[in-house]
Image (cartoon, helix red, strand yellow):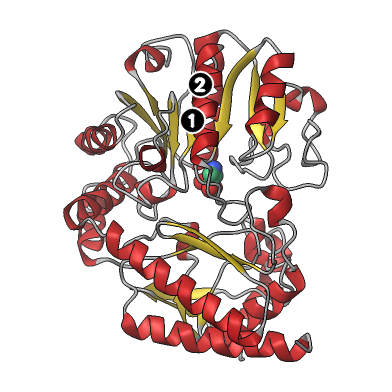
Amino acid sequence: MNLKNSSILYERGQKNLVGAVNSPVRAFKSVGGSPVFIDHAEGSQIVDVDGNRYLDLVLSYGPMILGHQYPKVQEAVSKAMRKGYTFGASTEGEIELAELVCEAFPGMDKVRFVNSGTEAVLSAIRLARAFTGKNQIIKFSGCYHGHSDSLLVAAGSGLATLSLPGSKGVPEEAVKNTLIAQFNDIESVKKQIDSHNDIAAVILEPVAGNMGVVVPDPDFLEELRRVTQEKGILIIADEVMTGFRSKFGGAQELLGLQADITCLGKVIGGGFPVGAYGAREEIMQMVAPLGEMYQAGTLSGNPIAMACGLSTLLELKASDPYQDLNETALKIKDILLKAADKYEVDLQVNHFGSMINAFFTNQKVIDFSTAQSSDTEKFKIFFWSMMENGVFLPPSQFEAWFLCTAIDENDLNAFEKAVDASFKTISDKFNL
Ligand SMILES: *Cc1c(COP(=O)(O)O)cnc(C)c1O
């Protein structure tokens, strides 16, 4: 495949950008080869600077649930742009988006907008500490909550059970209050709760999406709510990925979980940088200017970002595409499993609503260690073959694939052909 212009930009970008990217996954390190640079995108399709056209299952890692350049969203953004870009004072759009978000989340009376998921989560942690007067937090191995210091622990390392920093530059003091438990393993949570008495909150992705898609066991969530409630420990649902992805509102509602604090991002900005955290009244009363927990942002609630998020959510609310998205996911799952069967490749497909991904393993994937049983060499071959056959997937085994409402029958047919060709390549390469 021709990636000439992409590789020229990749070379040029190396000089003044770090690794030619602004977020590491975009460098394609875990699949090797030269990353693609994008020229434009429309609907379900994304086009790189060499004119290669792909079915886009990255969707900017989730936000573009309506597909690219959705007309009503385009219109709302253009209209907002004509009024100016940012004012350092409040606008009606912030209230409108807040009303819509609070209406969609039963546990949320008030919300604060920020500029990214990372910011939403770090603020939520501060809020949980402010509200409970306690310091420790429990996080699950393999869950990702952005790149703030205290959460860069067990976000993907072999030392998954130790509270050791997952990055250079993160001091041990910054993570000493972060306790680790295993997803879908309530005993590992109880053990931490029994041996510590300064726990403010448990933070989790209600459906994990940053170790590949891992769906929680209903008993696990029910027990989690019970044991935390008993000890006055808050639950922070990090719904940055899952919020407005599988229903209008949060995955926690679908799963029967009532969190105390919820974090949002990705879809609520519709492609602009927006994050949010919210909770019931008594908790949000802690946040400045009402309370003594400080948190602020020059561009928070940016009017153009609000317009984009608002028009995206209004469209999702009006069209309620979630049943259809789920059906698309089931078709995709079926295509993958049929091809795996045909070419005798070990494969597990996990999905929750419009988040889906495939693991090259014969083990059921229920947590970080089973996710890691996936054969990443096979994933690499699969990834590049899918690219050659016109499907853009996240360039890592441990990222979720996302679906948008613009995917049609033609896209699914193209996907099926690409999958068949890719499994054939795997089968040939590995002499299956
Ligand atoms: C993407 C993501 C984040 C971080 O959001 P950014 O906007 O990249 O800072 C946090 N938590 C979860 C669950 C995410 O998927």
User: Is 345 left or right of 202, judged from the image as shown?
Assistant: right
Q: Secondary structure at mark 1?
A: helix
Query: What's the amino acid at mark 1?
Result: Glu
Q: What residue would you read off at disc 1?
A: 222
> 106 above or below 302?
above
The percent coordinates of residue 285 (x first, y second) are: 37, 12
Nearer to the camera, 247 or 14: 247
**Residue 324 versus residue 142 in the image, above or below:** below
Residue hosting label 2: 226
Give the Cα distance between marks 1 and 2: 6 Å
Q: Is residue 120 in sight in this rendering?
A: no
Give x and y (percent) for residue 75: 20, 61
Q: In the rendered structure, are the residues bearing label 1 and label 2 in contact, judged by CB atoms less than 8 Å apart? A: yes
The yes-or-no answer for disc 1 within 8 Å of ligand 1 is no
Left or right? Give the position of 53 relative to 349: left
Q: Amino acid at mark 2?
A: Arg
